[in-house]
Image: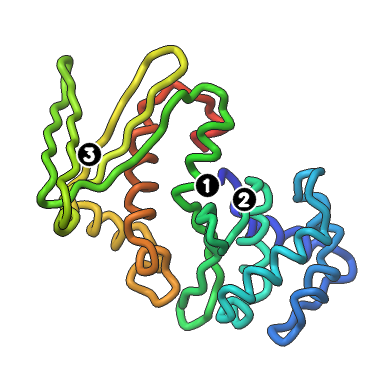
Amino acid sequence: MGVDVKNELEKRVASQSAPIKLTKDMKIVDMVKALEPEIRRALPTVLTPERFTRMALSAINNTPELANCTPMSFIAALMNAAQLGLEPNTVLGQAYLIPYKNKGTLECQFQLGYKGLIDLAYRTGQIQIIQAQVVREFDYFEYQYGLDSKLIHKPGEGERGEITYIYGFFKLLSGGFGFEVSNKADMDAFALKYSKSFGGKYSPWTEDYEAMAKKSIIKRALKYAPISSDFQM
């Protein structure tokens, strides 16, 4: 997102005449209640603080380690999901709240999921088709960039082997299209460089590598799509 929610929330809380006291042992319900004025201002009108609290409790039930993260980082990460209208840490795979160590402190990081990105793309009203696929070693795969670009993928039958490539493509309602391809080694290097949680126990890269690789390649493909700046942000 364009604004660092955690830093913005910390500034607002610190600027109040009576600073809000948050402690590591504070229950999530009490934390949300203490921050309710700021949360209410930050959330979409369709999402109440009560609904926000239920999302928080659900996320912690699904990933108990989140309860040990710094309170402000958890609230900020949850706000990111709420502002996008996405459910974090559910089987829907829309978004993830991930605990990770930052200079020895356990913090919570928001990460958009593959299905969440797809949902956001369709919300623009400009996308006809958007999809990503993994290619395996016994598939037939051929691609070519340039003025005579092409993308051909025929999945193998039976045992398809290990992942070799990941690709994503889109087609606009206007008829325009685009695609992006990455081999497995390049995707791993990308994840290692840009994901703070890569390799961690709770990382979606560990739990669902295929979905995260698909999300990453779709994001690259959409850089070439003439869609709204709000969505690109």
Q: Residue at x 76, y 83 (%)?
A: 26
Three-letter amino acid code of the residue under disc 3: Val
Q: Is mark 2 on a helix, strand or loop?
A: loop
Please report whichever mark, 3 or 1, sits nearer to the chain's N-terminal start: 1
**Farthest residue, direction right:** 17
Q: Would you name the residue on which mark 2 appears?
A: 86
Q: Mark 3 packing: few (<14 Cα in 10 Å), some, or many (20+)? A: many
**Up-down: is 202 above or below 15?**
below
Three-letter amino acid code of the residue under disc 2: Leu
- Residue 217 position, x and y percent, is 32, 43
- Asked if residue 185 shows in the view, the reply is no
Q: Distance between the residues labelled 1 and 2?
A: 7 Å
Q: How far apart are marks 3 and 1 (CA)?
A: 20 Å
Q: Mark 1 packing: few (<14 Cα in 10 Å), some, or many (20+)? A: many
Q: Would you name the residue on which mark 1 appears?
A: 116
Q: Distance between the residues labelled 3 and 2?
A: 27 Å
Three-letter amino acid code of the residue under disc 1: Gly
CB within 8 Å, label 3 to label 1: no
Q: Which residue is drawn at 56% across and 69% down?
A: 108
Q: Would you name the residue on which mark 3 appears?
A: 181
Q: Is residue 33 left or right of residue 170?
A: right
**Farthest residue, direction top:** 174
Please report whichever mark, 1 or 2, sits nearer to the chain's N-terminal start: 2
Depth order, front residue of 49/230: 49
**Up-down: is 141 above or below 81?**
above
Q: Mark 2 packing: few (<14 Cα in 10 Å), some, or many (20+)? A: many
